[in-house]
Image: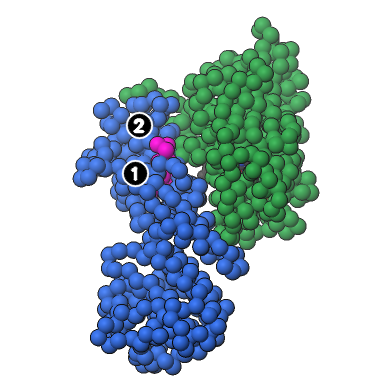
Chain colours: A green, B blue
Amino acid sequence: MHPFQYQRADSADQAVAAVAKTPGATFIAGGTSHLDLMKEDVHHPSLLVDVSALPLKQITAFEGGVRIGAGVSNTAAAYHPDLQQRYAAMSEALLAGASVQIRNMASMAGNPLQRTRCPYFRDPAQACNKRTPGSGCAAIGGYNHVHALFGASKACIATHPSDLAVALAALDARVQTTGPRTIAFPELLRLPGDTPHLDTVLEHGELITAIDLPAFAGRSHYLKVRERASYAYALVSCAVALEMDGPKIRRARVALGGVAHKPWRVGPAEALLAGQLPTEQLFQAAANAAFADAKPLEHNAYKIPMGRNLMVRALLETSGLQPMQGPAGTAFAASVGGVAGRLATPR
Amino acid sequence: MRMPHESAPNLQTGDLAPNCVLPDGSRLFEWRGRPVILAFAPEEWDPTRAHQSEIFARLSREFGSGATFVDTATDEWHALNCRGALAAQFGVAGQRALFLLDERGVVRWKTVVAPGQDLRAGQVLAALEALHSPPATAGGVSALGGGLSRRTFVTATLAAAALLLLPGCSTESTTKEANSAADPMGPASSADTIPVVLTINGKTHRLQLDPRVALLDALRENLHLTGTKKGCDHGQCGACTVHLDGQSALSCLTLAVMSQGKEITTIEGLSTGETLHPMQAAFLKHDAFQCGYCTPGQIMAATALLQDKNVRAGSAVEIREAMSGNLCRCGAYPNIIAAIQEVQRA
Ligand SMILES: Cc1cc2nc3c(=O)[nH]c(=O)nc-3n(C[C@H](O)[C@H](O)[C@H](O)COP(=O)(O)OP(=O)(O)OC[C@H]3O[C@@H](n4cnc5c(N)ncnc54)[C@H](O)[C@@H]3O)c2cc1C
Ligand code: SF4
Ligand code: FES
Ligand code: FES
């Protein structure tokens, strides 16, 4: 690990000033992504500004919705009774992610800012435009089974690993920063284009202070497929937010995870769903539309049928046409297969 | 300058080191003109091991051609046996000690630890502080111009860094000492350390650490709390699980400096005297391990789970999900779950 200076910030202003004036300075919150990558020799901050002690840990009612402080832990947000009930997809995404220990440490701002799990990115011996701009992309001709179906570029085909980000995209969350500005969630994260080293639109020294969830009176749900039952990243995931008008769908928002450099909202599919009666046929048509322009790579074509099936199932479960595997707002509802997917009765 | 006294060989800073015979047959005075480091240690202390070797390799490189330290025929860094005659001549028989001699053979820095105790950073830092000022006694040494040559200075800084990183060199320092260490005494380097105060199992520990040190390494290497295990070092296995303010957390992905102000509990803090924590007893009863490497982490995660209001007790499926952050390559999972269930029911 490269040497760095360390500074603990007592206020957001102090944190911003410290990072803004120091080239190579970064914030650190839970450290579960950043420190890991520092150990891997992928990140080399000159100065670490610790924002974990900032008073950004409240969850408050806000404009009919909820404002979640940037420093709230993933655990605290996931189990907040109001959030778990009103924004079940978010709790499900959080609780199906990482482990208890990591969720205790991880912050709400840090989670969507975690870096890709593309294995080549984490290996400094490999070419990677995201880690070392201009060095090439080892994944393009390499083993790309966890890589993108949508929005990839010639420079980078990585996917975004955060479960939370997918739920936030479906819930139309907004991010408050010290800009000061408000960034609609999907715009916070970028597509790779020819600048894959930039994951977000945040400026150097711009601190996220809160994540706002707008008012929502429908049902939301998150489903995730992984290579083992728990403690693994998503191969493909899907967040759904449905608002009903009597028996009909008034508005549907669907975001896919594990398929692009950012959570992938599927506009054409959402348009198909609006104003319709929920049926399996309809959901299948929507899933087909969602994946119509998928561009598979050498090793990731499996994600297309997997993603379609997952999206259909997520819509069926959200609309109530099919039961969830566990109580809404828990990891059991979010998991596909494995012990975690079935909540057995206590023995 | 005080000359070393045969009958009271208690060498102080500022003293001229005795012209003793070194293990390679040379006499110490032959090394004049270059700074020399003498390290005394018990035989079982092997400075070429593990990460120590890296530090000593760096010391070696830094000394380069202009200076050297005592070595053997093997041309390697050699720790002098602290039970030998030489140690007696330096007044450090049976003790771990480091001496830095300047170009004139004068002791400019010395740090000693009694057997069974730990080296203290405070001592090292105080010695470093002393290097800033002219030697305690005047006389012949004033020819150095009252200060240190740059090379000697670098040497001392590196040696201090080496000491701080050596296992067995748990550190303790006052704020004053900490401040002197933070002084820009040279180019910023990885040797820069900062004071870190940790509350572990109810006890306060004052350390002087490189900010890069993870809590896991501070526990194991600096404080000898080796119950907490290093598995993957990347957040993927749970072996390093501790409690931070009562919640389970991974010490490998936590910087020690960021753990300040938190109540840190390790596996060593679970039992009360000789009485095991019920979870420890249940793990024994249910044979919830084979090799035992993952066990401290499993037990720390399990005890945190006991206090977790968010997880329903009793169901094996819920325990599995809540414990999924702790891998066991021996596959003791069914017994681990049985142990946890028993304690949950009690
Ligand atoms: C073994 C393992 C398994 C995991 N599994 C999953 C999983 O299944 N699903 C999942 O979604 N995640 C998973 N994660 C990732 C984990 O969720 C993230 O690492 C975590 O959420 C990051 O949050 P943090 O607070 O620790 O961020 P940090 O590591 O502290 O920071 C991450 C980034 O955000 C920046 N940052 C932090 N706070 C702010 C702020 N307020 N404003 C601006 N920038 C900020 C930092 O500078 C840094 O660049 C896993 C991690 C590990 C180690
Ligand atoms: S896909 Fe992106 S992150 Fe992976 S190697 Fe290519 S450039 Fe790097
Ligand atoms: S050593 Fe910390 S999780 Fe493996
Ligand atoms: S008992 Fe050997 S790893 Fe768990």
Labels 1, 2: one chain: yes
Give the letter of the chain under mark 1.
B
Farthest left residue in view: B274
Label 2 crowd bin: few (<14), some (14–19), many (20+), radius 10 Å: some
What amino acid is labelled 2 in the image?
A: Leu
* Image side of residue B337 versus residue A297, left or right: left
Q: Amino acid at mark 1?
A: Gly
Give the crowd class for mark 1: few <14, some 14-19, many >=20 residues within 10 Å.
Answer: few
Tell me which residue sits at (38%, 63%) in the image.
B120
Tag 1 residue? B202
- At mark 1, the secondary structure is loop
Relative image position of residue A268 (x, y in whole percent): 77, 25
Q: Is residue B14 above or below residue A102?
A: below
Residue tagged 2: B306
Which of A66/B2 is in front? B2
Span shown in magenta: B237-247
Residue lying furthest front: B138
